[in-house]
Image (cartoon, rainbow, N blue to C red):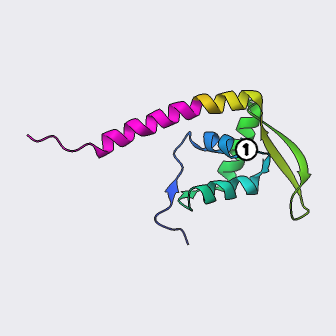
Amino acid sequence: MVDSRQLNILRGTLDILVLRAVSWRPLHGFEIRLWLEERSAGQLEVDDSALYQALHRLEARGLVKSEWGVSDNNRRARYYRLTDSGRAFLMAETAKMVSYAETITKLLTVAAKPR
């Protein structure tokens, strides 16, 4: 059952969120999904196919690299890590995204001007 309080990730934000998730250490897809869900307190709904499409897109752009490894439950898994260009991209896009979010918040929370 889908929680009506869950938020769909706005187009264009999944890539930056995935980059943030792998910015501390290499993670496999399921760990990335858990990271997003935990950090959003369950508010973001992440579709598996959208997540893997984002990972392939980021790898094609050279922002992440992947390699095969063994997960905690002893299964073969593809781990993704941030590249140097991915780190630079993440920093630049984070600054833009935060500025955008602050501007939208100001516009949506401004008190009505008396007539």
| Nearer-the-camera pick, 31 or 25 | 25
Residue at the (64%, 33%) spot, across then down: 90
Q: Secondary structure at mark 1?
A: loop
Magenta stretch, residue numbers: 93-115
Q: Nearer the viewer, residue 61 or 71?
A: 71
The image shows residue 76 at horizontal and vertical percentages of 90, 56
Asked whether, in this view, residue 57 is left or right of residue 26, the answer is left
Q: Residues within 10 Å of mark 1 (few under 14, many from 20)?
A: many
Q: How many marks?
A: 1
Relative to 43, does residue 25 appear above or below in the rendering? above
Outermost residue to the left: 115
Answer with the quarter of the image where residue 83 lies. Answer: top right
Which residue is found at the position 71% from the left and 31% from the top? 86
Residue appearing at x 31%, y 39% in the figure? 107
Would you name the residue on which mark 1 appears? 22
**Residue 60: where, in percent of width, then height?**
76, 32
Mark 1: which amino acid?
Answer: Val
Residue 108 forms part of the magenta stretch: yes
Principal secondary structure, stretch drawn in magenta: helix
Q: Is residue 56 visible?
A: yes
In the rendered image, residue 112, in percent from the top left (x then y), is placed at: 19, 44
Specify the quadrant that holds the C terminus: top left
| Left or right of 90 in this view: 102 | left
Q: Quadrant of the N terminus?
A: bottom right
Does the rendering let one see residue 46? no
Question: Is 20 located above or below residue 36 in the figure?
Answer: above
- In x, y percent, where is residue 31? 74, 56
